[in-house]
């Protein structure tokens, strides 16, 4: 088992340059940033609404 892993790694180094080539979406970070910005805006709107609500009832 270990020898198969070593052979596989040697093969990938010789043929692919050994670099890890993941198939990850590069936009994942952007999606996360967009989601955080959305919830930040929601929080500010909610604070404004609660503040207005409290002023009305005081």
Image: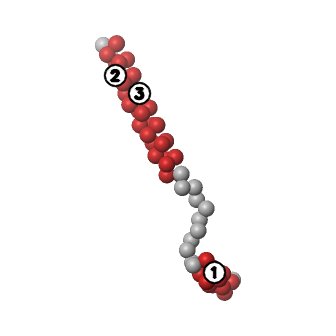
State the residue at coordinates (56%, 71%).
20
For the question of whether residue 57 can be seen, the reply is yes
Residue 52, by quadrant, is top left
Q: State the CA–CA distance, disc 3 to disc 1.
A: 56 Å
Viewer-nearest of discs 1 and 2: 1
For the question of whether residue 5 can be seen, the reply is no
Q: Secondary structure at mark 1?
A: helix
Q: Secondary structure at mark 3?
A: helix
Q: Is residue 25 above or below residue 33?
A: below
**Contact between labelled residues 3 and 2, with CB atoms less than 8 Å apart:** no
Q: Please state the horizontal and vertical placement of residue 38, each as a whole percent of the image.
A: 46, 37
First-in-chain label (3 vs 1): 1
Q: Please state the horizontal and vertical placement of residue 33, each as a whole percent of the image.
A: 46, 46
Question: Which residue is identified by label 3?
Answer: 46
Q: Please state the horizontal and vertical placement of residue 58, each as a whole percent of the image.
A: 30, 13
Q: Is residue 42 above or below residue 54?
A: below
Relative side of 20 to 37, left or right: right
**Contact between labelled residues 2 and 1, with CB atoms less than 8 Å apart:** no
Instruction: Depth check: give the residue in front, 19 or 32.
Output: 19
Question: Which residue is identified by label 2?
Answer: 51
State the residue at coordinates (31%, 16%).
55
Question: Which residue is identified by label 1?
Answer: 15
Residue 21, by quadrant, is bottom right
Instruction: Depth check: give the residue in front, 15 or 7.
Output: 15
Query: Residue reaching furthest top?
Result: 57
């Amino acid at each position: 088992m270990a020898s198969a892993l070593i052979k596989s790694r040697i093969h990938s180094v010789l043929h692919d340059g050994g670099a890890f080539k993941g198939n990850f979406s590069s936009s994942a970070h952007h999606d996360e940033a967009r989601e955080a910005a959305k919830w930040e805006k929601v929080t500010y709107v909610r604070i404004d609404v609660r503040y207005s609500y409290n002023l009305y009832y005081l």
